[in-house]
């Protein structure tokens, strides 16, 4: 494990444990995350085309990063960035707001 990785884990308050990758009891959370991602891709109707898959995965990761964790009560974005949460929806530009008022 690299020194940079160990430093980041300490900075973020994460206890890094080395476990066997194919041990079912220790790999359950990773398998669950893969299952959730696959399920969301199916629900979104994302095709196998690279650009659609990329956009769908980007959206899934963003939603996951902004979803509060049940054990901590905070989302991963808050824990890592320690800043205000971005919106899932882009802000309207000034010209868009002016057109809506007219």
Image (spheres, rainbow, N blue to C red):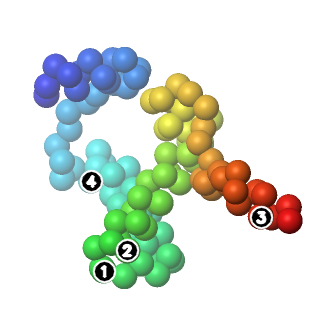
Give the number of the mark in front: 1 or 4.
Answer: 1
State which tag comes first along the sequence, 2 or 4.
4
Q: Looking at the image, which residue is at 77% across and 64% down?
A: 99
Secondary structure, mark 3, is helix
The answer to whether the residues at label 2 and label 4 have Cβ atoms under 8 Å apart is no
Q: In which quarter of the image is the C terminus?
A: bottom right
Q: Position of residue 50 (x, y in %)?
A: 28, 73
Question: Where does the image place residue 92, in percent across and percent down from the top left?
Answer: 68, 54
User: For the residues carrying marks 2 and 1, which lies nearer the camera in this image?
Assistant: 2
Identify the mark nearer the N-term, 2 or 3: 2
What is the spatial separation of the Cα atoms under label 3 and label 4, in whole angstroms?
A: 56 Å
Report if the CB atoms under discs 2 and 1 are less than 8 Å apart: yes
Q: Give me the residue at 48% from left, 52% from top.
A: 62
Q: Where is residue 54 in the image (x, y as percent from the top left)?
A: 34, 66
Q: Mark 1 points at which residue?
A: 48
What residue would you read off at disc 3? 99
Residue wearing tag 4: 24
16 versus 34 height, above or below: above
Q: Is mark 1 on a helix, strand or loop?
A: loop
Which quadrant would residue 38 be assigned to in this image? bottom left
Q: In the drawing, does residue 26 fall left or right of residue 55? A: left
Mark 2 or 4: in front is: 2
What crowding class fits label 4: few (fewer than 14 Cα within 10 Å), some (14-19), or many (20 or more)?
A: few
SS of the residue under disc 2: helix
Marks 1 and 4, how far apart at CA: 29 Å
Residue 52: mark in rendering: 2
In the image, residue 22 sits, relative to residue 81, either above or below, namely below
Q: Nearer the viewer, residue 69 or 25?
A: 69
Label 3 crowding class (10 Å Cα cut-off): few <14, some 14-19, many 20+? few
Disc 1 crowd, CA 10 A, few/some/many (<14, 14-19, 20+): few
């Amino acid at each position: 494990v690299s020194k940079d990785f160990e430093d980041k884990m300490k900075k973020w308050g994460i206890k890094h444990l080395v476990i066997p990758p194919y041990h079912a009891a220790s790999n359950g959370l990773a398998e669950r995350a893969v299952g959730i991602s696959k399920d969301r891709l199916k629900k979104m109707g994302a095709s196998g085309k690279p650009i659609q898959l990329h956009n769908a995965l980007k959206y899934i990761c963003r939603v996951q990063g902004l979803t509060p964790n049940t054990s901590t009560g905070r989302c991963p974005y808050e824990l890592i960035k320690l800043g205000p949460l971005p919106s899932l929806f882009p802000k309207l530009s000034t010209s868009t707001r002016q057109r809506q008022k007219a």
